[in-house]
Image: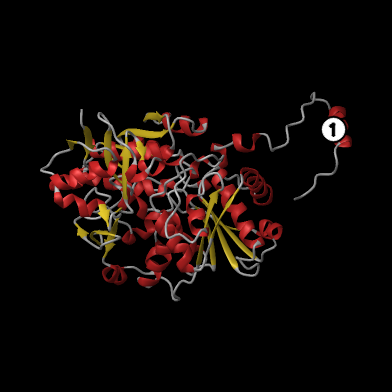
Amino acid sequence: MSDFVRGLKCRMCGKAYPKQPLNYCEDDFGPLEVDYDYDAIREVINRGKIEMRPFNMWRYRELLPIDGEPTVGPLVGGTPLVRAHRLAEALGVETLWIKNDAVNFPTLSFKDRVVSVALSKAREFGFTTVGCASTGNLANSVAANAAQAGLNTYVFVPQDLETAKIIGTTVYGAKLIGIKGTYDDVNRLCSQVADRYNWGLVNVNLRPFYAEGSKTFGYEIAEQLGWRTPQHVVSPMAGGSLIGKIHKAFHEMYKVGLLDREPRTKIYGAQATGCNPITSGLKAGQDSHRPVRKPNTIAKSLAIGDPADGYFAIKVMRETGGFGEDVSDPEITDAMLLLAQTEGIFAETAGGVTLAVTKKLIDQGRIPRDEEIVICITGNGLKTQDAVANAVEKPIIIRPNIDDFAAVLEGQPEPVLV
Amino acid sequence: MPIKVHIPQAMRQHADGQASVDLAGANVKEVLDALGQKFPNIVGRIFDNGQVRRFVNIYLNDEDIRYLNHLESATKDGDVLSIIPAVAGG
């Protein structure tokens, strides 16, 4: 299958570039974005054709920037959209859905979507060494997918990451470089690495292609709702790219004829108060984010103080009529427990951020209680267990004796549902 | 000892292909002005109406100048100034 990419285009000045591993415009340093021939895509794509394909992210491959078949991550995506009745009741809203990328394959976060595109592209460009700057989930995903693809891998992370995210990277044989500094320090170093070595860094020189993978999160939501879009979507923000790609996904689907009605979805962004460059810029009425030098939150996967897409994230929240909020660490933990105890979904701290922000926006009256809401869960709680370790009940230890157990039951109140 | 300025790959075509140049100046602005005098085509790519462009980050010895004193951040001999595209990561 041929691809439908005309090349790359600067999001600021519109300057066109041929397809190549390059993330910024040489004239104004603006981000480069993939430029598609939507008229040609419209000719070849339709709902029936997509529905015939396996339920994974590649069923939308005409709208993804790879040549031919994907060679990395052929089974990524196709995660559940869960109708969350009990959580809806707890929040006092009518219709609530959870898009659950905590169970994305293979590394339990939405990052597998972007990585499969980026590494398929890396192979097309002929790179044999790949890497990334990461807060953890991306590290896991690059390491696993690159191992399967047989690529050499260098992963750069802040040195103070959660143990699960460190072992979940090194187990795949990736070289893990822990940086004494913040994610933004890591990121800057990676731009310098990309400048010096001829490597495919997924979120540096491959970023225009990489970022497109996030759109499949949005395509799946719309298809799973029966080829329509919800009224409200709440998404976490780290680099600020995902919320823009969900919005873009909905509008592309309309443009190529997959949706009957023009999307009117309001997009909301969620951050932790300990690292809130985007929501603080939005709330202050600025057109871009306010960089945070020293992020301090349990939501480490969102701890990007100087997000590359801060400007675009604020724009999409404003233009769609959505909003952004941030929440404290205790609110994050409470929300993780609420999600687990109402829906049986153990999300990572970023999921706690998204749910807690959703609750806040509902309580503020910004999201009406009688309209349809989708919450984006992007990572798995098994990777950030420390965040809830002290908030959950300790197990009761007894001898293997029936009277011991009866004594426990007598001493305990009836189990209470949340 | 002068101040070493690192130039990102995509801008080197406007800097005689050089990856870095040695320049003088008492603060970041003076150093970048010196860079602009040497390679006039670079100025408009870094600055827009006298402001550093939205997607350009300037680092003085590994620290973002926005967390120092912006363009007024003082420089001394032996410092390293890096011009780095901001659109990475996430």
Residue ID at (37%, 69%) = A46
Where residue B48 sits in the image (x, y, percent)? Answer: 27, 57
Q: Which colouring convention does the figure follow?
A: secondary structure
Where residue A384 sits in the image (x, y, percent)? Answer: 56, 37
Q: Is residue A89 left or right of residue B9?
A: right
Tell me if residue B37 comes above or below residue A400 in the rendering: below
Q: Is residue A279 visible?
A: yes
Residue ID at (61%, 46%) = A328
Residue ID at (42%, 56%) = A288
Where residue A327 sits in the image (x, y, percent)? Answer: 60, 50
Mark 1: which amino acid? Val
Where residue A50 sits, quadrant-wise, is bottom left
Q: Is residue A249 left or right of residue A29?
A: right
Q: Is residue B22 left or right of residue A299?
A: left
Locate the N terminus of chain A by quadrant: bottom left
Where residue A11 sits in the image (x, y, percent)? Answer: 30, 60
Tag 1 secondary structure: helix
For label 1, the residue is: A408
